[in-house]
Amino acid sequence: MRKLKATLKYFFAVLFIAAGSNHFFSTSFYLHIMPPYLPRPLLLVYLSGLAEIILGGLLLIPHFARAAAWGLVALLIAVFPANLHMAANPGLFPEYGETTLRARLPLQLLLIAWAYWHTRPTAPVKDGGESVVA
């Protein structure tokens, strides 16, 4: 389980670094999905992208990994309104099917759970190679 968690943490970090970088390459997409009631949408797009890049990178540094995972939990909760906005207003996003827009909601919850998993300490390995619950 230890190797699986480490591998998935690496994948999760790369996912966020790539997604955060995409905020700077596909800014118009993120502006389009920004709920209209939020102020300074361009600034929010850039800040959320930068946060994803930084937190994804920090997730790979053992000393900062737990704090970065908590940061990702908070960030994923903070951007959840964009997914709700899309699901509640499918007419504004005709390029995506209504099912796809609704499927993003549980996917976001899965990502939150995945980030939370990385806030938990990994069980130490006993001499016999078995993990023990910490």
Image: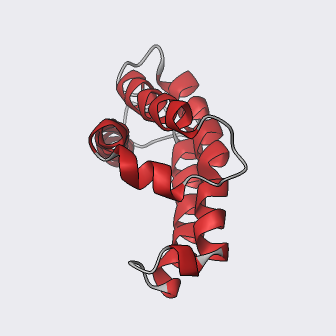
Q: How is the image coloured?
A: secondary structure
Q: Nearer the viewer, residue 28 or 118?
A: 28
Residue nearer the viewer, 117 or 17? 17
Side (left or right) of 10 relative to 97? left
Query: Going by the image, does 55 lie left or right of 108?
Result: left
Q: Quadrant of the C terminus?
A: top right
- Judged from this view, the residue extending furthest toward the top is 63
Q: Residue at x 47, y 24 (%)?
A: 65
**What residue is rendered at 32% in x and 36% in y?**
24
Residue at 66% across / 65% down in the picture? 84
Q: Nearer the viewer, residue 123 or 19?
A: 19
Q: Residue at x 46, y 13 (%)?
A: 63
| Residue 92 locus on image (x, y percent) | 54, 74
Residue 74 appears anywhere in the view: yes
Work out which residue is located at the far right of the displayed protein and give it: 37
Write down the quadrant of residue 29 in the picture: bottom left
Q: Is residue 66 above or below residue 80?
A: above
Residue 3 is situated, as x and y percent measured from the top left of the image, at 31, 42
**Tally of numbered discs:** 0
- Residue 86 position, x and y percent, is 58, 68
Vertical comparison of 24 with 8: above or below: above
> As displayed, is residue 68 above or below residue 106?
above
Residue 35, x across and y down, in percent: 64, 55
Q: Quadrant of residue 70?
A: top right
Say whether residue 129 is visible.
Answer: no
